[in-house]
Amino acid sequence: MTLHRRLVVLAFMSPWIVGFSVFFVYPLLSTLYYSLTSFDLINDPVFVGARNFVFLFTKDPLVRTSAANTAYLVVAITVGRVGYGLLTALVLSKLKSRASGVFRTLFYLPALAPPVAAALAFVFVFNPGTGPVNNLLDVVGIKGPLWFNDPSWSKPSLTVLALWASGEVMVILLAALLDVPTDYYEAASLDGAGPFTKFWHITLPSISPVLLFAIINSIIVGLQYFTESTVAGAVASGSSDAVGNVASLGYPDNSTLTFPMWLYERGFHSYNMGYASAMATVLFGVSAIFTVILVQRLRATAGGQEDS
């Protein structure tokens, strides 16, 4: 490639290069730098080495709690979103009538709801005293739980909220299912393959790249779970200030306290931005590790299928 053509390609790529540098590389490097400092957003940062990371892994009393809650949500949201999205997409892919478009729209609409409004609606629906869910359970003789007001039920309630708004996963999986050549299924039927055999040996391998994207996306959603948890905990506690009230953070009993919420509290309530940057660095590292592992697994699986 000549120098002229290289410059032309670089010119066309320059908007992306500038955006990537300004909105990703620079913030990432700044976060890494501030993670090694004591910085309160007012005074100049003071270099402290790895002190923030040592405190993070050994002394912070709520890091383990917030990390455990986040791990729970990552597993529950990933399994639920991908499983629910795949099951819904499989059902919708079989519909041939005009009503299929209506059902697709209905399943996707919750994904368009603003997170704050969705969390408010769910706290109202699952209100233990006046919510319609517990009222319906009372009709059939079942005493409903306290939902967002009970530490044992708060995280499952957040998981249900996340699944309700997972229409985008269903849409991309449905597009992948509709793109699988029908010739594969016809040939498998001639060989006597049943529905499960077709799904395991044709459907899953064909949509594996899209399925991997859905898994990675769901893991990242779980790792960054912040808005819904913050609003739900604050409203369930009776607070009118979802973000500014530290007392309602993680209500009830820190059961809804996620790692990003604790990061936000350290950085913008306690003005310990150096420590918050260290937490953000760890969160980014965990996300990157999950992504690399899943991509490597997909490549190994695809390589094995090609060899066979």
Image: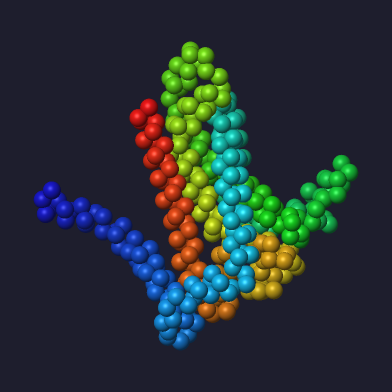
One can see residue 37 in this view: yes
Quadrant (top left, top right, bottom left, bottom right) of the C terminus: top left
Q: Is residue 267 visible?
A: no
In depth, the one of 32 and 217 nearer the eye is 32
| Between 96 and 295, the one nearer to me in the picture | 295
Residue 289 in which image quadrant: bottom left
Residue 247 relative to residue 128: left or right: left
Along the viewing direction, whichever of 176 and 218 lies nearer the viewer:
218
Q: Would you place residue 96 above or below residue 48 in this image? A: above
In the image, taking residue 63 as reference, residue 129 lies left or right, namely right
Q: Quadrant of residue 236?
A: bottom right
Q: Position of residue 26 (x, y in %)?
A: 36, 68
Residue 31 appears at what percent x and percent y?
Answer: 42, 71
- The tally of labels here is 0
With respect to residue 227, does 160 lie above or below? above
Q: Is residue 216 left or right of residue 154?
A: left
Q: Residue furthest bottom?
A: 43
Q: Residue at 24% across / 54% down in the picture?
A: 12
Q: Measuring 39% from the left and 35% from the top, which residue is drawn there? A: 302
> Where 183 falls versus 305 (above or below)?
above
Q: How is the image coloured?
A: rainbow
Residue 90 in percent (x, y) is at 56, 31
